[in-house]
Structure formats: C-alpha cells, structure tokens
Image: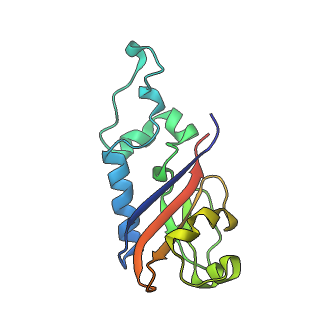
Amino acid sequence: MGASGWDYSVPYQEDLVGAFDALRRKVFEERDYYWGPGGDWRPEEERLPWPETEEELWEHELVQHDGTHSILDIFQIIGPDEKPDYSTMKQVTEEEALRVLGTRKLTRAHVPRFEEFDHWRWYGRCAVLHDDRGEPREIYFWGYSGD
C-alpha cells in the first residue's frame, strides 16, 4: 500500500501533550484511520469488527506491520533536543521555523511549505500556528506512516 500522509489541526492549548492525546483519542473514536482487517474490500465473512480499544487495535498483526496511516501510529512527543525515532513526533521550534521559513511565528499560510521541515516515514511533526496578531490559534500535526 505504501505510506500515507496525514494532517490534523486542533485549537491551541498550552498543553501540547494533552492536545496530542486528545487528538489521538478522537481519531480512534471516530474511526478515522485505516483498519485493514475490517476493510470493505474484504469479503464480508472475513471482515473483523472495529476494535473497542487501542490495545485491541495494536494486537492485530496486520496493524503492527502496516500501521493505521494516521496519528495513531505516533506514540509520543519528544523534546527539542531529542533525536527523532520510529513513532515519535517533534514540535517545530521557533529557531527551526526561522531557519527554514524565515519567521519565528508560523501561520496557516506557511502550512504548504511544511514539507521543507525535516520529516521521515513513521515520524510526525507539529507546529503552533498564529493569527495575524502573532497570537497562538491552533496546533497543526502532520506526518507519514503506514506500509
């Protein structure tokens, strides 16, 4: 199948980890992810029901191998000085934004250029987006995952 790109936006809050956790719960609850074992491309008698919990989701071998092609494939946010690893997410710092896009305060208008930030498969990024007055308004999450 190949990796899939995904992105989400949530209202700004100071607690980045809390926003990330709430977004992951929402994606799971709304079934906004790839669930291959229950896919409608399978004959009906072979389809598995949607999992009730994330633990149940990750118990399935196909999901362990192929992922969910969503933010559910990312398990933690790492600090600015930590090296990116499989299933981690790293926030764009003001210094990185300045170096890559020439500004410390990213806005929604910068999103099309976010490909210029470091990124790899099975790794996510996030950034605080500001309004025209420089006030934080949303947190934007994006990445690539799945096989």
Q: Say above or below: 55 vs 19.
A: above
Seen at 44% across and 69% down, the residue is 139
Q: Position of residue 64 (x, y in %)?
A: 53, 40
Image quadrant containing the N terminus? top right
Name the image quarter holding residue 46: top left
Q: Position of residue 93 (x, y in %)?
A: 58, 80
60 and 145: which is toward the camera = 145
Q: Is residue 87 visible?
A: no
108 and 29: which is toward the camera = 108
Q: Say whether residue 14 is left or right of residue 145.
A: left
Q: Position of residue 126 (x, y in %)?
A: 52, 68
Q: Say whether residue 111 is left or right of residue 32.
A: right
Q: Say whether residue 105 is left or right of residue 14.
A: right
53 and 130: which is toward the camera = 130
Colouring style: rainbow
Q: Position of residue 61 (x, y in %)?
A: 51, 34
Q: Is residue 107 visible?
A: yes
Q: Say above or below: 133 vs 26.
A: below
Seen at 48% across and 21% down, the residue is 41
Q: Say above or below: 65 vs 38.
A: below
